[in-house]
Amino acid sequence: MPHYAPHARLLAPDAQTIAEAAALLRAGGLVGMPTETVYGLAGDATSDRAVAAIYAAKGRPAFNPLIAHFATIAAARREAVFSAAADALAQAFWPGPLTIVAPAVKGGAISLLARAGLDTLALRLPAHPVARALIEAAGRPLAAPSANRSGRLSPTSAAHVIEELGERVGIVLDAGTAQHGLESTILACIGEEIRLLRPGAIPLEAIEAQIGRPLKSAAGGAIAGPGMLASHYAPRAALRLQAQAVELGEIGLDFADALRGRGQLDLSPAGDLQEAAANLYSYLRRLDAAGAAAIAVAPIPPNGLGAAINDRLRRAAAPRGGP
Ligand code: TXA
Ligand code: MG
């Protein structure tokens, strides 16, 4: 069985280890892949067997589709129908933390299981040099959800991947801490319509500046994914948002010292949203590991990356075990 090594191997990325990881991918195995957003659990997007192994490793409901990662725009174009609007977005933001959902071409190479049977496909061209080198060396697009168990916090370091998936992943390429710390922004580009499916590492303001009009959100539920489930990206501890103070039995997660020294950790003492995004998941993990039953989170401004940070916090705070 080449699928799972008995123990995940944590490797520093270089030409040789990337070639090794690519060989494992071509044999149907899974690799912890660093990207500029969060670490992904990568498998051959053209193989039903590899995609099934991804769903199994994450414990993800198989009706929740995966993003296909490409090394070039030309390769992405072979798998989906790009509208003029999608084209312009790809030119502006690829490579980078934008995922485009577009109609899948008939007879494309991506496993139908990766799309969970939908007639649309999520595509992304990561900017991280190790991700790009790995996709190129594998010689095929890679399906890669965030490398966490379903419903849990996304991993922003190689150690988090091991924590989440242990021996369920063969090789983890360790490229240090993820730059953005938040998943990609997802836009559906169907016809000339553009709709926001998930706020993420590219602020909405940047997208609106590019398209020259306000962005519409997806009308409820038509194209839902696990990132849109009410409870998602969740730590074990309960979360209380918009906290003005830390109550008895709580541990404080601060922003810009709003809790006036009562926070255990501060996402960004200087009030920098980019720094807060990069720290969000690892700080929630640390407070969880400290055994907190409840985390009081200071208010985060709604603008720029604050939109995505607040989105993740609301889902992390939502009642568990819902639909
Ligand atoms: O930054 C990222 O996007 C990371 C890195 C590893 O690339 N990946 C990531 O994948 O966040 P994942 O699987 O954790 O989240 C992908 C989201 C899910 O909410 C899924 O439902 C949605 O994309 N999605 C995938 N295909 C879709 C489709 N055809 N239509 C609508 N949503 C889709
Ligand atoms: Mg995820």
Image (cartoon, rainbow, N blue to C red):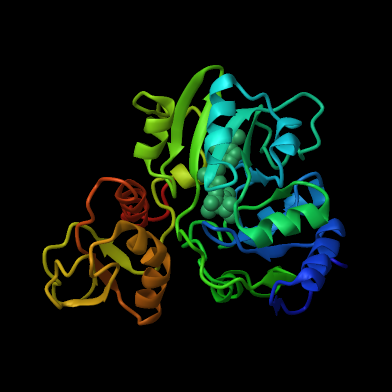
From this viewpoint, is residue 53 visible? no
Number of dots carrying numbers: 0
Q: Would residue 249 appear left or right of 11 to someone viewing this image? A: left
Q: Quadrant of the N terminus?
A: bottom right
Query: Which of these two is toward me, 18 or 318?
Result: 18
Residue at screen point 67% across, 53% down: 55
Q: Residue 4 lies in what quarter of the image?
A: bottom right
Query: Which of these two is toward me, 197 or 224?
Result: 197
> At which x and y percent is residue 115?
67, 37
Q: From this view, report whether residue 87 is shown above or below residue 285.
A: above
> At which x and y percent is residue 65?
62, 42
Residue at screen point 73% across, 79% down: 7
Q: From this view, report whether residue 312 is shown above or below residue 78.
A: below
Q: Residue 277 lies in what quarter of the image?
A: bottom left
Query: Which of these two is toward me, 212 or 39?
Result: 212
Residue at screen point 41% across, 60% down: 234
- Going by the picture, which residue comes out furthest to the top? 191
Residue at screen point 28% across, 67% down: 268
Q: From this view, report whether residue 266 is shown above or below residue 69.
A: below
Q: Residue 295 lies in what quarter of the image?
A: bottom left
From this viewpoint, is residue 12 visible? yes
> At which x and y percent is residue 299?
19, 57
Q: Quadrant of the C terminus?
A: top left
Q: Would residue 254 appear left or right of 22 to someone viewing this image? A: left
> At which x and y percent is residue 316?
36, 57
